Amino acid sequence: MREEIDLIAVADGVEVYLEDTGPLEAPAIVVLHGGPGGSSYALREGLEEYLDGFRVLYLDQRGGGRSPALPEEPGLFTIDALVGDLSHLRDHLGLDTWCLLGHGFGGLLALDYARRFPQTAERLVLINPWTNFPWLATQLYRASLGLRGLADQADEPKVPEDGVRLLQEAFAHVEPKAAFDRLMFPSQHSRMEYEWVAEGLNIVGADTPGRMFVLNGLWRLDYTPFLLEVHTPTTVLLGSLDGTSYPEAQTITDLVGGQLELIEGAGHYPWIDQPYAFAEALQSALHNL
């Protein structure tokens, strides 16, 4: 299989790591990992077999994964900057259009790219996307209570829109990873399988992107009002057991007018929990490309 690995200059001297795979003449799909500050490594390990026959672009977003580290300057880490990088990347590759496949935080980037560059976004495939961060903070707050044996106190917080306050309270008592794990993984088996894949990356990614996005107010962002401006054909693949996106992500298809594929029994990484149902849902989403 064809594979080209390179650092691509996108804007203001910033470079991003890219794995360009598959037939050049095939429909192009850019894969947008979660985070902020993650890597496309685990997504390639999980999705590659399902995307056979496409030209697939596995991108490590600026400052994260295997892309070069950047200074701790909040202005370098904004939604506008990451979406701008995608536009520069598409121009660099000479692509008129492409499909965007976003997972978690990457789903937000796919949506905002389609909102800003609708002529070049052919289709969106969103896997357990994150768009309402105050809601996600509320979920993490509840998860922290559950981990402390206080689930009976997990009523709706008085100020749910203040995501930062909720996170501070949640993470004052439990490790962030423990709270996320409680929401993402329906079983210890799926958690261990994902960690086994992620450990194969064998790098320690910088946490600069995540910290800079906190400073930029990410946890106060509810993208819901902007969904009305997205008109690209969209499919949301949603694991029924993913506490970081279900049921909130159903709002996306309600407002965009897209297709919802609910994968029963799946968490944040549905290809691990329900591979056959996930394969069927993904093929349905991509059949027009």
Image: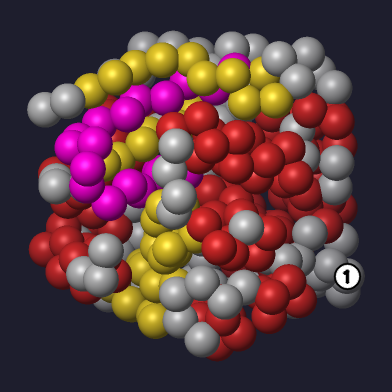
Residue found 68% across the figure and 59% down from its top: 116
Q: Quadrant of residue 267?
A: bottom left
Q: Horizontal and vertical percent for residue 174?
A: 64, 41
Residue found 35% across the figure and 25% down from its top: 19
Question: Of residues 225 and 16, which is closer to you in this image?
Answer: 16
Residue 248 on the magenta span: no
**Is 69 placed above or below 10 here?**
above
Residue found 16% across the figure and 69% down from its top: 280
Q: Horizontal and vertical percent for residue 239?
A: 36, 67
Quadrant for the C terminus in the image:
bottom left
The answer to whether any part of residue 205 appears in the image is: no
Question: Of residues 51 and 179, which is closer to you in this image?
Answer: 51
Q: Which residue is mark 1?
A: 159
Q: Horizontal and vertical percent for residue 57?
A: 36, 36
In the picture, measured across the screen, residue 168 lies left or right of residue 44, that is right
Question: Of residues 265 and 67, which is closer to you in this image?
Answer: 67
In the picture, measured across the screen, residue 67 lies left or right of residue 213, that is left
In the picture, measured across the screen, residue 169 lies left or right of residue 119, that is right
Quadrant for the N terminus in the image:
top left
The magenta stretch is 15-33
Type of amino acid at the residue the image marks with label 1: Val
The answer to whether any part of residue 231 appears in the image is: yes
